[in-house]
């Protein structure tokens, strides 16, 4: 199995208890979105990547105006894009404390009651539909690729260098071969 470079794995954390929760929402009306299908794919990728315990990921499907605003605000890029990923938690984030600096108890495990917030994956189905013929082929395959790509980004994978791109694309193919059956 292909693994990201060690520096990219900092966001993952194992826990003894709890479950992975993937929240999905369709906030657009331009294209049909099978929320159950994409929920299952995101969940499968998280599990295959070794995420266990109490963890949460949001998978949002948005319109072009929303993705355009997010792309400009967070990436400094004008125009719509197909997918954005926003990692949230990091193992090195400090213990949750109240404003006075106290915790809920001296012996409390700081992560015991709080799920690991992995992040948000934001997909624009309208852009995916336009890009599909020149990328993955079908709309369904394009959405699958974007979901996998976004989840991997949230988990620390990147494509800033040629080697990172090669590794990430290989992992995407592996995840798609294992968990995505194509258009149906």
Image (spheres, helix red, strand yellow):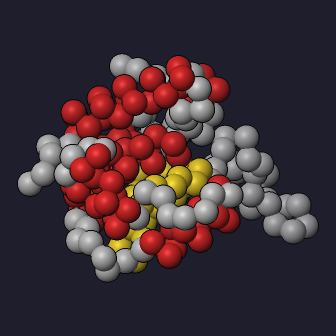
- Residue lying at the far left in this picture: please name it: 184
Q: Is residue 158 above or below residue 64?
A: above
Residue at image coords 15%, 46%: 182
Closer-to-camera residue (80/169): 80
Figure quadrant of the C terminus: bottom left
Give coordinates of residue 115: x percent, y percent: 55, 55
- Residue lying at the far front in this picture: please name it: 134
Give coordinates of residue 21: x percent, y percent: 41, 57
Figure quadrant of the N terminus: top left
- Residue lying at the far bottom in this picture: please name it: 29
Give coordinates of residue 28: x percent, y percent: 37, 77
The answer to whether residue 40 shows anywhere in this view is no
Residue at image coords 53%, 46%: 154
Q: Is residue 15 above or below residue 36?
A: above
Give coordinates of residue 11: x percent, y percent: 60, 39
Residue at image coords 41%, 34%: 49
Residue 128 horizontal side relative to residue 12, left or right: left
Q: How many marks?
A: 0
Residue at image coords 25%, 68%: 33
Q: Is residue 76 above or below residue 154?
A: below
The answer to whether residue 155 shows anywhere in this view is yes
Residue 45 horizontal side relative to residue 163, left or right: left
């Amino acid at each position: 199995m292909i693994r990201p470079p060690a520096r990219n794995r900092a966001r993952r954390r194992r826990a003894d208890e709890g479950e992975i929760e993937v929240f999905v929402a369709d906030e657009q009306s331009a294209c049909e979105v099978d929320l159950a299908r994409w929920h299952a794919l995101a969940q499968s990728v998280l599990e295959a990547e070794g995420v266990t315990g109490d963890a949460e990921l949001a998978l949002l499907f948005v319109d072009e105006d929303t993705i355009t605003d997010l792309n400009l605000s967070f990436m400094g890029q004008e125009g719509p894009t197909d997918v954005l990923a926003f990692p949230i938690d990091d193992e090195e984030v400090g213990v949750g404390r109240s404003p006075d600096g106290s915790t809920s108890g001296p012996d409390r495990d700081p992560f015991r009651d709080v799920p690991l917030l992995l992040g948000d994956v934001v997909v624009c189905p309208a852009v995916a539909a336009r890009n599909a013929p020149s990328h993955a082929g079908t709309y369904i395959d394009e959405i699958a690729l974007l979901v996998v790509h976004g989840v991997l980004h949230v988990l620390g994978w990147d494509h800033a260098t040629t080697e990172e791109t090669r590794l990430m694309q290989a992992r995407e193919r592996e995840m798609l071969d294992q968990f995505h059956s194509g258009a149906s």
